[in-house]
Amino acid sequence: MNASVEKSWRIPAVCDGQSIRHFLLQRGQFSRQLLKKIRKEGVALLNGKPTELWRNMEEGDELVILFPEEDRGASMRVEPGPLEIVFEDEDLIVLNKPSGIAVIPSIDKSEPSIANRLLAYYDEKGLGVTVHIVTRLDKYTSGLMVIAKHAYSHMLLTKKEKLISRYYEALVEGQLDKTSGEIDRPIGRLEGSIIRRTVTGEGKPSITRYTVTEEMGSFSRVRFELLTGRTHQIRVHMSSIGHPLAGDTLYGASEVEGFKGQALHCRHLTFRHPWTKEWIELESPPPVKWREILN
């Protein structure tokens, strides 16, 4: 039997006399949908005994919520495979994703994915949960990505996504006129394409900060901070100023011998833990293959 996820609170004086329902909505930041799911399929324990959500609590009471097992969906398959885990606790996982593997399964499900491997990992740990991606990376983008281990931590993390700072590094074609700057150009879907994005007046506001860290021959090494989170944002912005990412043929770059896809890596993550409220900072150097391109 897979284990249920559980969370507990020691009721503070300020919440004395509140109902469990009110406490979970206000202090626990439960959505009404999640609260409904707990009422129907989960369990609430007050001082170790099952109780109803309308019950009032007293200062010092211990409230424990047992979440129901999560439905994975018929299309999700278990597929063992390597995962480079750089941080893990009961609420979340941070992976160092390699280039060349998709985060979610393809339509025909013919190729491996991070999601399939996570399900296999969860089964090894006896966790009755599905995959909750918080910061998604493109197939050929490598680096750090955050995954919530259950629906509750996913809800908290996505509510606080503005507190997740992501810093990327890339190799781009050519040498930029300025060593640092900010690209503020709206991005939207390219007409006639379900994949490509473009700079367009009808797009959503998109801001990318960049700093050149190294110049070598035909390429520059650049670090980026995303102030917004649009699909393909760095790729579109750099292409729009005439410096597409190395190998990014989708956005106008030339192919790089011995290298597949765009040279883009999520190097640095800073975020506030959804449960402990501690700040977590993680770093991952870009692939060693990049040095061959620069040389």
Image (cartoon, rainbow, N blue to C red):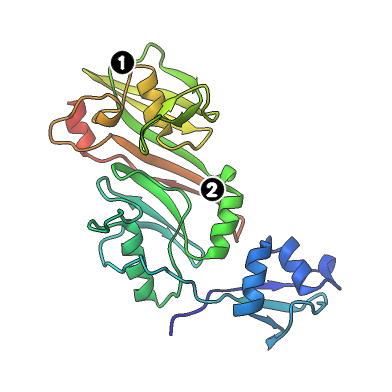
Asked if 73 appears above or below 39 in the picture, the reply is above
Residue lying furthest bottom: 49
Amino acid beneath label 1: Gln
Q: In which quarter of the image is the N terminus?
A: bottom left
Q: Of 227 and 70, which appears nearest the observer?
A: 70
Counting from the top left corner in percent of width and height, residue 157 is at 56, 54
Q: Is residue 167 visible?
A: yes
CA gap, disc 2 and disc 1: 32 Å
Indicate whether 156 appears above or below 266: below
Q: What label does residue 277 carry, if any? A: none
Name the residue rendered at 62%, 56% in the picture: 277
Tell me: residue 158, above or below residue 33.
above
The residue under the point 68% across, 60% down is 29
Left or right? Give the position of 33 relative to 132: right
Number of numbered discs present?
A: 2
9 lies left or right of 250: right
* Residue 53 screen position, x and y as percent: 74, 77
Q: Quadrant of residue 30?
A: bottom right
Residue occupying the point 23% across, 56% down: 111
Dot 2 alpha-carbon crowd within 10 angstroms: few under 14, some 14 to 19, many 20 or more:
many
**In the image as oriented, which residue stretches furthest toward the top?**
177
Q: Name the residue under label 2.
A: 271
Q: Residue 175's mark?
A: 1
| Percent of width and height locating residue 177 | 38, 11
Point 38% across, 17% down: residue: 241
Label 2 is placed on what type of residue?
Phe
Quadrant location of the C terminus?
Answer: top left
- The extreme left residue here reads 257
